[in-house]
Image: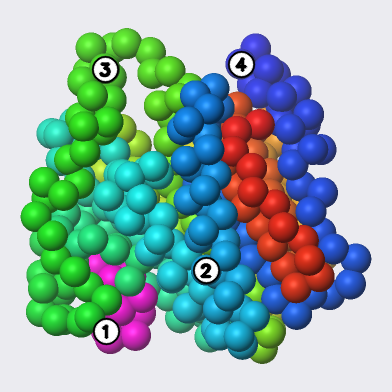
Amino acid sequence: MKLIQCLLVFTLSICTTAHGVASESIPDFAIVIHGGAGSASTDSELISAREQALSAALDKGVEILKQGGSSLDAVEQVIRLLEDSPLFNAGRGGVLTAKGHNELDASIMDGKTRSCGAVGGVTIVKNPISLARLVMTETRHVLLVDHGADQFAKTLKHPKIEIVDPSYFKIPAQVKRLERVREKERLSDAEKMGTVGCVALDVHGNISAGTSTGGLVNKKHGRIGDSPIVGAGTYADNKTCGVSCTGVGEDFIRNSVAYDVSARINYMKQKIDKAVSEILNREDHPVRGGIIGIDHRGNITIQFNTVGMSRAAADSSGLRLVKIGK
Ligand code: ASP
């Protein structure tokens, strides 16, 4: 109970500073990105490297949206850049399982049609977000996992799907991190890297959302988190909003968090800020992590109840934010 109380007090103070990013008029386009909840590093080099990576990803997304590109393209391209960076828990920088290898999860959703695609536990695909998008467009399914997903990737022979050796993902920082968890040492804040996610609203009024992750460090072989579960870690519906989540995946799955944000807007007529804040502050079923979202009017929300969250946002009215940590 004490822990919950602590968490809630902290949440409130963070939330009040974190989500005041909405612009007054309805923007033509808007984009918001997270680089994972939990990050409160004091290592200035790491902070500035992450800032630069987020800033470059934001620029890419803005460029696509400014030129009239689709929110789906913006979300996919932004996430690909973050997956290629070793600084985030996704793609190259994904954390290792208890067995010492990578099992990557990702999902993407198109708010115009509610089409969606997802992959879980992939081990040889450089950019799981692109594979998720191809599950959406090239199959009649929503979620492919494990060998089936890797196999699908191989047979596609698609320019966006690069097959890599699993050693590509075994970067020294993650090997060290797993060793420290195994030795039951407390991880320093600097090592708490997170999942990546992006939500975008394009000039055609379409909202898309996507999330990509290595999951939780030292996770059991075969464990799937919220990130590839549509309705838990990712959701998009043009009528309501787009959402991407980060944090303890099991909390987000139990509470269908991403869909809950949309449902609260749809049925309860809540504003996106309130919907997200109520979910992150609830006492009965705690949800530990962070949520980013954009509603159908272009209002951006960024909230978290952890020590920090890497985040970035921009819109056509001139808003631009890039922030790491608190
Ligand atoms: N939500 C992710 C998972 O549980 C982890 C994270 O966001 O850092 O797999």
| Residue nearer the viewer, 8 or 80 | 80
Task: Quadrant for residue 69, please give it.
Answer: bottom right
Quickly name the residue at label 2: 60
Left or right: 117, with 163 as reference point? right
Q: The N terminus is located in which quarter?
A: top right
Q: Are marks 1 and 2 in contact (CB under 8 Å)?
A: no
Expressed as whole percent of the image width and height from the top left, the position of residue 133 reads: 36, 75
Q: Against 64, is 231 above or below?
A: above
Mark 2 / mark 3, whichever is N-terminal: 2
Q: Which mark is residue 206?
A: none
Q: Tell me which residue sits at (64%, 80%) in the image.
A: 66
Q: Which mark is residue 3?
A: 4
Marks 1, 2: nearer the viewer: 2
Q: Secondary structure at mark 2?
A: helix
Q: Is residue 250 visible?
A: no
Task: Quadrant for residue 12, please give it.
Answer: top right
Expressed as whole percent of the image width and height from the top left, the position of residue 227 reads: 41, 54
Q: Which amino acid, by three-letter code, is at mark 2?
A: Lys
Quickly name the residue at label 1: 139
Q: Secondary structure at mark 3?
A: helix
Mark 1 / mark 2, whichever is N-terminal: 2
Q: Against 147, is 176 above or below?
A: above
Crowding at dot 2, Cα within 10 Å, few <14 / some 14-19 / many 20+, comes out as some
| Gap between marks 2 and 3 measured at Cα | 35 Å
Quickly name the residue at label 3: 180
